[in-house]
Image (cartoon, coloured by chain):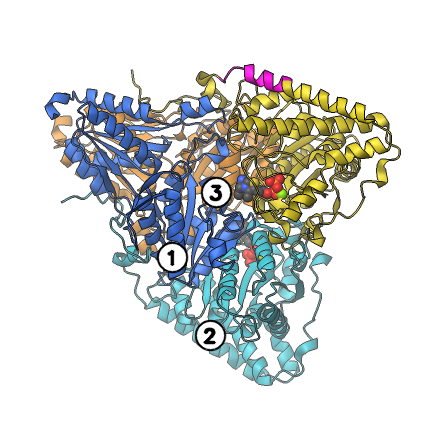
Chain colours: A yellow, B cyan, C orange, D blue
Amino acid sequence: MADTQRPTGAKGSAKQKGESAKALRGYYEQMVLVREFELRASEMYARAKVGGYCHLNLGEEATVVGLMAALKATDYLFMGYRDHGYALMRGLGAGPVMAELFGKATGVVGGYGGSMHMFDLERRTMGGYGIVGGQIPPATGAAFAINYRSKAGKSADAVMCILGDGTTNIGAFHESLNLAGLWKLPIVYVITNNRLGMGTPVELSTAEPDLYKRGSSYRIPGTRVDGHDPVVVRDAALAALEQARVERQPVILELMMYRLKGHSVVDPARYRSKEDTEEAQANDPVPAFRNKLVKSKVLDEKAADAIHDAAEKIVNEAVEFADSSPDPEISEMFKRVYATQVPNMPDRFPGDPVVVMS
Amino acid sequence: MADTQRPTGAKGSAKQKGESAKALRGYYEQMVLVREFELRASEMYARAKVGGYCHLNLGEEATVVGLMAALKATDYLFMGYRDHGYALMRGLGAGPVMAELFGKATGVVGGYGGSMHMFDLERRTMGGYGIVGGQIPPATGAAFAINYRSKAGKSADAVMCILGDGTTNIGAFHESLNLAGLWKLPIVYVITNNRLGMGTPVELSTAEPDLYKRGSSYRIPGTRVDGHDPVVVRDAALAALEQARVERQPVILELMMYRLKGHSVVDPARYRSKEDTEEAQANDPVPAFRNKLVKSKVLDEKAADAIHDAAEKIVNEAVEFADSSPDPEISEMFKRVYATQVPNMPDRFPGDPVVVMS
Amino acid sequence: MTEMTYRQALNETLRAELKRDENVYLIGEEIGVFEGSYKITAGLLKEFGPKRVVDTPISEEGFTGVAIGSAMLGLRPVVEIMTINFSLIAIDQIVNHAAKIRTMFGGEVSVPIVIRTPGGGGQQLAATHSQNLEVWYAHIPGLKVVAPSNPADAKALLTAAIRDDDPVLFLENLGLYNLKGDVPDGEQVGEIGTAAIAKEGTDITVVSYSRGVVTALEVAKEFAEKGVSVEVVDLRSLRPLDRNTICESVRKTSRAVIFEDDLLSYGIGAEISATIGEGAFDWLDAPVRRVAGAEVPLPYAKPLERAAMPDAADLTKVINETLAASAFKGDQNV
Amino acid sequence: MTEMTYRQALNETLRAELKRDENVYLIGEEIGVFEGSYKITAGLLKEFGPKRVVDTPISEEGFTGVAIGSAMLGLRPVVEIMTINFSLIAIDQIVNHAAKIRTMFGGEVSVPIVIRTPGGGGQQLAATHSQNLEVWYAHIPGLKVVAPSNPADAKALLTAAIRDDDPVLFLENLGLYNLKGDVPDGEQVGEIGTAAIAKEGTDITVVSYSRGVVTALEVAKEFAEKGVSVEVVDLRSLRPLDRNTICESVRKTSRAVIFEDDLLSYGIGAEISATIGEGAFDWLDAPVRRVAGAEVPLPYAKPLERAAMPDAADLTKVINETLAASAFKGDQNV
Ligand SMILES: Cc1ncc(C[n+]2csc(CCOP(=O)(O)OP(=O)(O)O)c2C)c(N)n1
Ligand SMILES: Cc1ncc(C[n+]2csc(CCOP(=O)(O)OP(=O)(O)O)c2C)c(N)n1
Ligand SMILES: [Mg+2]
Ligand SMILES: [Mg+2]
């Protein structure tokens, strides 16, 4: 691992004291749920129950849990395509999320989006996006809307936009940072630095590998913390969100982690060195957090195993739910495209006549 | 004027000593030529001899002259649409440049481009571009080609890319900086900061109004100097080009100036405050440099007037040349579109039959 | 009824909608202090302030995306992209996001955004500033595309677009802004998705849209004097496309010519011609001809620009050829 | 002749051209270390090194523009844009720059760049990753657009594209990469701008391109068994478009159906249908029909995706309807 990629700022071990055992146990339960869900998703993909692209949060569990612990239900969340775990933490439900992967009518968006496009308007979970960087301008626009409608303050809404390390090289990121900085928008840009964009290491994709510094051309402050500890991540996110809410100061938060598996479920990641893969495995946040909690007596092995079993049960039920759910109605397809119906809508299946006149 | 917009770095007065009178006189002659040419261009526009958009270098003369004094004939130049003066300094000729404005066959690109698109492959003047920021990736690509073919060194080629302050907010600028920084390309990004993009002041277009710092997200160094003195500009440009040639280090060079007139010849600039306009006029580089040279005895008033007369003569001849030149041949139009002819070229005028079969 | 220019119709409609709905705001480059490159937004910053009339940096992708995100939260942005040529920089946000967000998220959210942008050549702005790319947007599901040809439709369709819950690309044209016409007073909500018969006729149908309709009507008038009755169909809406109105007209006249400002191959006229071929096949007396731009990046020099752009003379020639091809005898129709 | 996949044909052609000309280099995301998202460039980094096979950051606009600028200085970049969906981010560089630079600068400079990019749906990649936007590029003067349907054409046209001095958009398709076919050995320089008769026939013409040709040939074979002789025209080149080959075929068969993977309104088929209407009007016995994608952002769920995409059954149905519409009697043709 390149030196530039070593976490700075708060380290995991530090912050634990003062945390209630209940909270810590809760975080662990959530991390395990994400882990179990993702492993099952990849199994279901292998069984052809899931199609298209499927990007997993394996290695990102502590970050997912910590960020979502900091984000209020009234805040807005925009994501990339690596979005399953976030959707679970935002309460979209293991069943509906799995059903979306299965492309079923009971999926979070009725089977229209699949893995990359988890969305729930009520829960202010504004979607996973597949175009790299595509979510960043709309996320910035959500912050614009908050500004448009309401005053800054501790209880003000804010936006969190999740993006990957490789995504910091696309123009939309920079235009958005400039607008957010210029207009003082309440948004936190979270960079999940898993050190790789597909097969490309950060050092080979950016001229400034300290990604938390990439706001410096826009006077946007940034911090980098270890993404392997949910408490550290949560606290960093809380501080960033506070700045956004109260000062209307956009902030960059970089979280350091590893991608445990390939870019997507179909990528064997042969391009990764043995050392790199071993280093990633050695830093697996789930066993690490488990051991930490066991050492600090928050959990004993039995309780920890019970947590795994509980998660497995939830995932089993999610799979059953998805499997037994109906396919979306083909007849409804055109209804999803436009919100306002007007004359001469092009609702036509392949091979239908183009002109139909009385 | 906002404080952020005050020039830092080398000031005009400093550097004059050690300059040969001949060189200084030469710079003044060039500045006057640009000034006279632009005033005449705008007059010709008023007389409908020139059409389309027409953006002038008025207020930018010292910068144009200083930059082009630093740039070797073997270096490559990419520009925005405010390109007349640069074209003159690169030796494209007052006649052919004026003829291009007139849309004549004798124009630098045969009347196909007009004001925004001065170009001369032999003179490595790679064009003026009308899409804001559009020239930046290709300019970066020219630097890529230099890298591809040749070694770094004092005598290596380099690229200079001219862009405006407002242009620093477009994504293409940022993607290009990242690529240039990552790949160590020999290019100098020159920001002509005339404080306005059309009607928008720098403070309202960017979150980092110190534009020379906009490379900081890419570890690209920048300097800002006064754009009103050709010697200061030349020396700053020489230093920047040297870094590009020898270290393959991309550099940002910000030059501070005022736009003396509207954005284009048709813009009355009513949105500008009286103070702003007066400040701009007070900083007109042409009389300022004249006075400096007269004070320092490089010129006397008579010689200075002679320089104006000589420039006027050149411009008069350019207008005559343009006026008496033929229009481009309509029959040749399609020949300019493709370099390699293939079957079924769509060479058709409006109203021609679409399918012609024997 | 009040006579006003296309520009005034747009300006007054924007003012009325800003007054009507707090959620409506304008965003784009130079629309405030500068009052718009083409002065469509003149006076609006002064009247509504910087919250409702937002000047942006030169960041088409960024501010278009900002508008999209704000629309997902219920605001109703009217974006001005200075000319359609610059929309290419924002096109990923328009086509991969605004147009797809609703379907991709199962119909749970809508993106009520209007993108106003002028196209068109003829001002010697050269290759990169003279395009008509509306056909690209007209191809995209999830978008609606309107292209009014006169001040009254400009008012009615802009009002409808702002109140529509889907993303609407509102096509203007540099050559139309000074066009005068009578505009009905008071609120006018037009219908997106229907064409209009701009002039009734019996001998031949000319189909056009936006600026092309102005030329088509001039030419129709000249033919009327020669005893040829030309019907002019103004598409108004490019997406959805009102195929039935087009085909009904051609079934009546049995001849059709398309007049379009854009380029011929794969242009708007191709779809119109294909539609007529499918919907009026048995009625056609002659091949459907297209009068469109020459396929070159538009040159700067006036003689070249003029030669490359379709005009009244070209349309007249092709109408005559089409009448001849169908052995049309003027007197039969007198 | 060697049998190989479309993917292998591309890979071997890239290798041969890299060997032949020092100025040829490959640039794009994940084409080196990762060996290409779809493994088209497998092995080339190892063989030619990082100077000739350039991995880029995720900056489509940036690296496409870099390729353009390098081409203006005489290099011959072959850009891979991972899928055509992402080309929207680079489209200002492709359309406002690569396509226009030559004309805008009076023909003094050329931009010898190839942009390889796959389109196509059918892999459940959902709305933003399943598009066929080739019609946009086919509309643009200054560009050439080719869309080979088989390994042999892939080799011949990619070689021609790399040696052509103009910007060429080389359209691939996710559904074609594993298609096998015989490929002539040794250097093969194809011709850009001409269509091919993929299968001769006398009763009806089916016009298609890229992946659609594969389906068209299957369907043609089935009809042959029923005594209906289908001619299949493979466009190969979308710009320039070989209108004469299309019209000659239809003048022979007097019936035409277009099968296209893209969306119907303003799609590739519209131009083909308009062209036939103009060039074979007097020969047509029935309206020209189009079989194209349903106009929706492609949904993820398999049943929806399948329903929205045109397939062999749709083509068969429309061929039968077209034969019926022209009172076709199989026996007349046996
Ligand atoms: C504009 C665009 N270009 C390319 C791609 C293909 N692509 C999908 S994910 C990805 C890598 C992104 O890496 P990173 O931002 O680090 O996120 P990660 O996958 O590591 O979470 C690429 C290149 C895309 N989806 N969109
Ligand atoms: C992509 C794009 N957006 C908008 C425009 C319209 N436009 C032309 S010049 C200009 C202002 C540029 O300002 P600046 O970069 O400061 O250059 P200056 O004109 O001051 O030299 C704008 C907005 C354009 N040509 N291209
Ligand atoms: Mg990553
Ligand atoms: Mg400026």
Q: Which is in the foreground here, disc 3 or disc 2?
A: 3
Chain name for mark 1? D
Nearest the camera: B23 or A214?
A214
Residues at marks 3 and 2 on the same chain: no
Nearest the camera: A163 or D89?
A163
Q: Quadrant of residue A164?
A: top right
Q: Position of residue D250 (x, y in %)?
A: 19, 34
Chain name for mark 3? D
Q: Secondary structure at mark 2?
A: helix
Q: Position of residue D63 (x, y in %)?
A: 51, 53
The residue beneath circle 1 is: D17
Magenta residue check for A240: no
Nearest the camera: A114 or B355?
A114
| Residue at 69% from the left image edge and 75% from the top image edge | B13
Q: Position of residue A60 (x, y in %)?
A: 68, 36
The residue beneath circle 2 is: B312
Task: Give, as a three-letter code, the residue at label 3.
Answer: Leu
Task: Give, as a three-letter code, the residue at label 1.
Answer: Glu
Which mark, residue D88? 3
In the rendered structure, the answer to whether residue C71 lies left or right of residue A341 reads right
For residue C279, above or below residue D198: above
Whether residue C55 is visible here, answered yes or no, is no
Q: Which residues are magenta?
A: A317-328
Chain name for mark 2? B
For residue B234, above or below residue A106: below
Q: Position of residue B185 (x, y in %)?
A: 56, 63
Nearest the camera: C225 or A318?
A318
In the rendered structure, the answer to whether residue A238 lies left or right of residue C291 reads right
Task: Give, as a three-letter code, the residue at label 2.
Answer: Glu
Say whether marks 3 and 1 touch (CB < 8 Å).
Answer: no
